[in-house]
Amino acid sequence: MSTPDHVLVTGASAAGLAAVEALRRKGYPGRVTVLGAEPHLPYDRPPLSKQVLSGTWEPERAQLRAPAALSALNAEFVLGDPATGLDVSSRTVRTASGRVLSADAVVVATGLRPRTLPGQAGLAGVHVLRTLDDALALRADLLSCARLVVVGDGVLGAEIAATVRGMGVPVTLAGPQPAPLACQLGQPAAGLLADLHTERGVELRLGAAVSGLTERHGHVTGVRLETGDVLPADVVVVAFGAAPATEWLATSGLDLDNGVVCDSRCRAAEGVYAVGDVARWHHETLGRSLRLENRTNATEQAIAVAGNILGEDRPYTPIPYFWTDQFDAKIHVHGMPAPDAEVSIAEGSVAERRFVAVYRHDGRVTGVLGWNMPKQARRHRQELAATSLLAESG
């Protein structure tokens, strides 16, 4: 395989930037172009639901690199011009402004788009939280908010609820699960998280899906549950998931199914790769396709793709990992703990809210969770790699 003369990265995200940096670290001397839909230089998303939303960080602090560091990459950043189409055979990307960009290798890093509720578009007081501009718009509304309702009991929804409650705003968290992050954490961790939110003043309305919004004169007034109950609100955040941003690839011929479908090298077609939240690739160790929505994967997958672009030809086989900070809880999850797994406490104490939980399925370790014990959880992660996930490839 010859080294490409030009690499085009579609998506000025953490994953996109990590791909560029990895190419340069590995000695790639060729031309690099980064195409971004937003006008901003690459920034980090995890602080949006925490430090930026709360106002403890100025927006500039979320930038991933200083302008001087970006300049040192010798890459052309084309910002504020989203990709609208891809011709796979010629590896040519069209943009909203009419640009036509061709390259020898294309990296798709367009991330996610938030899911929305019926009737949400154009309704004042209703927000999603995906971009920096989303975070700033939500914060502006919260400064005069009497009651926030967060629709979504996953990681993002729970983080938003915790942050906003910390700002002193009354918050209701709504969603269909029995506890926040129940599908990701199982018991006892999800139940403990529910207790933590309740103790800090978050009203939990869980166990019933949201069916829509109520409004008056074009402004949201509440959230309607499938039970018929209405939760009053003057600001609503819809955070019940996101879908891979692949609409612009609809006519490309790529296999699109819950993301850009790739082989074990994260290759979607000859010279076309995908990284980060948008990529669904074959995990050789697990023996199945996987798509991960977290910051760590965005970086690690981008590094792997950079190597494969340069001919390393290595499968990407990470141990899944994510983390979340809510109130004073720092939760780190390694592997793939299932809600129905057998859970044991390996270290620490649930009562003291400092512990490591080990998840087993059919006798095999499938996940490790650290609650305010990140270093200890990493030690047990090594056990996970040795006895569980890697064993499946044998």
Image (cartoon, grey):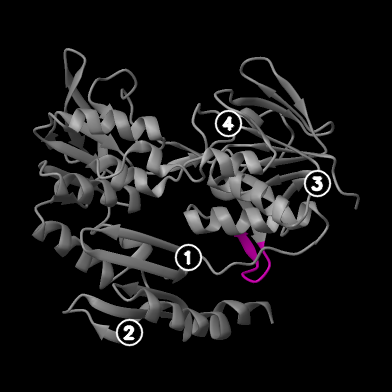
Which residue is tagged 1?
Answer: 321
Which residue is tagged 3?
Answer: 29
Q: Position of residue 346 (x, y in %)?
A: 34, 87
Q: Is residue 50 toward the left or the right of residue 165 in the image?
A: right
**Amino acid bearing label 3:** Pro
The mark that comes first in sequence, 3 or 4, is 3
The mark that comes first in sequence, 1 or 3, is 3
Residue 344 numbered tag? 2
Q: Position of residue 135 (x, y in %)?
A: 32, 35
The front one of 342 and 90 is 90
User: Is residue 288 shown in magenta?
Assistant: yes
Q: Look at 48% across and 52% down and name the residue there.
A: 293
The mark that comes first in sequence, 3 or 2, is 3
Query: Which-is-in-front pick, marks 3 and 2?
Result: 3
User: Is residue 31 shown in magenta?
Assistant: no
Q: Position of residue 116 (x, y in %)?
A: 37, 32
**Amino acid bearing label 1:** Tyr
Q: Position of residue 320 (x, y in %)?
A: 51, 65
Is residue 282 something one can see in this rendering?
A: yes
Q: Are marks 1 and 3 in contact (CB under 8 Å)?
A: no
**Label 4: which secondary element:** loop
Which residue is tagged 4?
Answer: 36
Q: CA distance from mark 4 to mark 1?
A: 26 Å
Q: CA distance from mark 2 to mark 4?
A: 45 Å
**Amino acid bearing label 4:** Gly
The mark that comes first in sequence, 4 or 1, is 4
